[in-house]
Image (cartoon, helix red, strand yellow):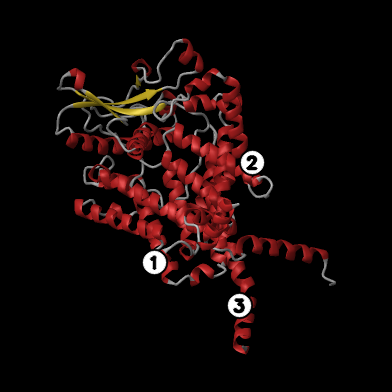
């Protein structure tokens, strides 16, 4: 009885200390989970984010990146936008059977499988960088370096996707395009009686892949080499 | 008695904080989340399995070297960056599915829940580029469930304990896990709402139309709603205001049922009309974290009685029939 009371007293006196330590950990965790949304939300054309948010994000980077807390939570934001697909056109076959798209409702089932392919197409599009820097980028070394890094990043992803397609298509020649599907406004939809999946509403985006060539950007220390382009 | 005012206030704030984060809680709500999250994790791993070579193999869409290089400037890491052998990745996914099912049925939950989370995390860092909100919410729930003792209810563990776990009052870890889920949901909705404030379509009320008219997402054709712009704009603004004020209105008991009902409606809409059943279901499940464990226990007791009436219930029903 006395021993129980002693144990209870020890637990009671330890509780504030334990709660204090846990509170500190909870506060640090909460700072971690708001860091990425704060940075993402506060970015502008001029800044990558509010300076305090960038600083916080840097401090918590190991924690939030490793534990997968680094999300902006911008669902359908800032606006619902056009969707993006991948289209592979085989260059050596009957034109009516030549192309296939990712994602595809018929081939990609169940729906989660469809969504995985959809995200892959959006990811590829999101990383796409023009094969040449625009004039403004070409004049500023910092922007040029950034363009080059982004371009290399995109090319690495592009090469991996092409390796996969090379195997899937057993070495046949093909063209890989990014397709954009804009969302119709109510006037287009009801006025023009445009179906949501009207083939005319899908647009091939330019510069999905430039011809195989060596690009030398002015002032650039290195030159990205295009590989695997099969246009 | 003669404590200065500031000290009493500080003590009051500390007590409220401690009560909020550390008051013991039963495991009923967490158990429901554990079952749902475990099943969803198993399903997600199964879907990866269906095309495992295309997702994780040597010549997958995004191979392991590319992903490792892609994250080389970040603190992300996955052991799936080390191997892509067909047998290796299949064994990995089999183990992941088995652990997720163990989590769902509540078998050895003290380690099956954290291990399920870890396997989910490893897959997430490998599958960069194919992820979306579903992965975020499932990994989030699995991480927080690892903190609590969700296996104390509706689990093999509780059965094996002969019911002793179920009768325990619960501990602070259950409360901490629940609060972490709740606060994280508030962060998600707050920034989801703030993000929408950056876009004109959420201001002029047309965003709901564009979501419905998104063919690649669409699973139920609701474009006829576009003929009623009043309704579309009202739905847009209702969603926006609900998201923005969720973090404040979900706490008071008087507004909580309304906020949670709206959450269920919005996520059911996303599940049914926008083809994201998995994501919609998991968001609805996560919102259940705001239901007190006692309430959850009463609900399930009612359901159990309804499904399998006990002797006393049968007697009551017979008496009612005779009357």
SS assignment at label 3: helix
Label 2 with label 1: CB-CB less than 8 Å? no
Q: Residue at x 59, y 34 (%)?
A: B240
Q: Is residue A44 above or below residue B80?
A: above
- Name the residue beneath numbered marker 1: B108
Looking at marks 2 and 1 on the same chain, the residue that comes earlier in the sequence is marked by 1
Q: Nearer the viewer, residue B108 or A41?
A: B108
Query: Which percent across, then down, holds residue A194?
Result: 42, 14
Query: Which percent across, then down, holds residue B190?
Result: 59, 42
Q: Is residue B143 above or below residue A170?
A: below
Which chain letter goes with mark 3? A
Q: Is residue B112 above or below residue A208?
A: below
State which mark lies toward you, 2 or 1. Answer: 1
Which chain letter goes with mark 1? B
Q: Residue furthest bottom?
A: A2
The answer to whether residue B6 is left or right of residue A89 is: right
- Name the residue beneath numbered marker 3: A11
Marks 2/1: CA distance? 39 Å
SS assignment at label 1: loop
Q: Is residue A149 above or below residue A101?
A: below
Q: Nearer the viewer, residue B106 or B149?
A: B106
The answer to whether residue B231 is left or right of residue A123 is: right
Badge 1, how many Cα within 10 Å: few under 14, some, many 20+? some
Which chain letter goes with mark 2? B
Q: Residue at x 63, y 35 (%)?
A: B241
- Name the residue beneath numbered marker 2: B245
Q: Residue furthest front?
A: B322
Marks 2/3: CA distance? 39 Å
The C terminus of chain A is located in which quarter? top left
Marks 1/3: CA distance? 27 Å
Q: Are marks 2 and 3 on the same chain?
A: no
């Amino acid at each position: 009885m006395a021993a129980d009371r002693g144990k209870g007293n020890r637990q009671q006196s330890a509780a504030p200390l334990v709660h204090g330590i846990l509170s500190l950990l909870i506060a640090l965790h909460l700072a971690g989970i708001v860091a990425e949304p704060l940075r993402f939300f506060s970015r502008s054309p001029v800044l990558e984010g509010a300076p305090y948010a960038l600083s916080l994000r840097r401090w918590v980077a190991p924690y939030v990146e490793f534990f997968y807390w680094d999300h902006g939570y911008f669902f359908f934001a800032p606006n619902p936008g056009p969707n993006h697909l991948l289209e592979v056109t085989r260059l050596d076959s009957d034109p009516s059977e030549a192309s296939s798209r990712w994602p595809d409702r018929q081939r990609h089932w169940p729906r989660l499988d469809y969504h995985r392919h959809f995200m892959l197409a959006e990811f590829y599009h999101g990383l796409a960088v023009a094969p040449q820097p625009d004039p403004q980028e070409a004049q500023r070394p910092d922007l040029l370096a950034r363009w080059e890094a982004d371009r290399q990043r995109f090319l690495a992803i592009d090469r991996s996707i092409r390796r996969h397609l090379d195997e899937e298509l057993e070495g046949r020649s093909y063209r890989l395009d990014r397709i954009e599907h804009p969302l119709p406004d109510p006037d287009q939809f009801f006025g023009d009686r445009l179906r949501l999946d009207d083939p005319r509403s899908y647009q091939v985006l330019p510069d999905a892949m430039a011809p195989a060539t060596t690009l030398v950007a002015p002032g650039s220390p290195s030159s990205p080499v295009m590989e695997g382009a099969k246009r | 008695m003669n404590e200065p005012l500031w000290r009493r206030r500080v003590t009051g704030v500390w007590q409220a904080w401690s009560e909020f984060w550390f008051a013991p809680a039963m495991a009923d709500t967490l158990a429901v989340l554990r079952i749902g999250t475990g099943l969803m994790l198993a399903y997600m791993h199964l879907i990866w399995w269906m095309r495992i070579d295309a997702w994780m193999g040597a010549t997958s869409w995004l191979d392991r070297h590319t992903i490792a290089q892609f994250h080389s400037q970040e603190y992300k890491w996955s052991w799936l960056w080390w191997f892509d052998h067909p047998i290796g990745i299949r064994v990995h996914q089999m183990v992941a599915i088995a652990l997720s099912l163990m989590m769902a049925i509540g078998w050895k939950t003290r380690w099956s829940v954290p291990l399920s989370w870890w396997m989910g995390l490893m897959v997430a860092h490998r599958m960069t580029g194919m992820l979306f909100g579903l992965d975020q919410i499932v990994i989030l729930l699995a991480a927080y469930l690892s903190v609590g003792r969700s296996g104390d209810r509706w689990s093999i563990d509780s059965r094996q304990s002969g019911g002793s776990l179920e009768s325990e009052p619960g501990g602070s870890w259950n409360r901490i896990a629940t609060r972490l889920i709740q606060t994280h949901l508030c962060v998600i909705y707050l920034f989801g709402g703030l993000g929408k404030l950056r876009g004109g379509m959420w201001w002029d009320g047309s965003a709901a139309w564009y979501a419905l008219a998104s063919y690649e997402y669409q699973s139920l054709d609701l474009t006829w709603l576009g003929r009623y712009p009043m309704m579309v704009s009202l739905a847009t603004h209702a969603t926006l205001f609900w998201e923005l004020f969720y973090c404040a209105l979900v706490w008071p008991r008087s507004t909580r049922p309304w906020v949670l009902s709206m959450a269920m409606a919005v996520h059911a809409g996303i599940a049914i009309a926008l083809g994201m059943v998995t994501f919609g279901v998991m968001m609805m499940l996560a919102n259940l974290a705001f239901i007190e464990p006692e309430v959850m226990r009463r609900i399930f007791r009612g359901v159990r009685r309804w499904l399998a009436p006990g002797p006393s219930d049968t007697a009551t029903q017979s008496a009612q029939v005779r009357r």
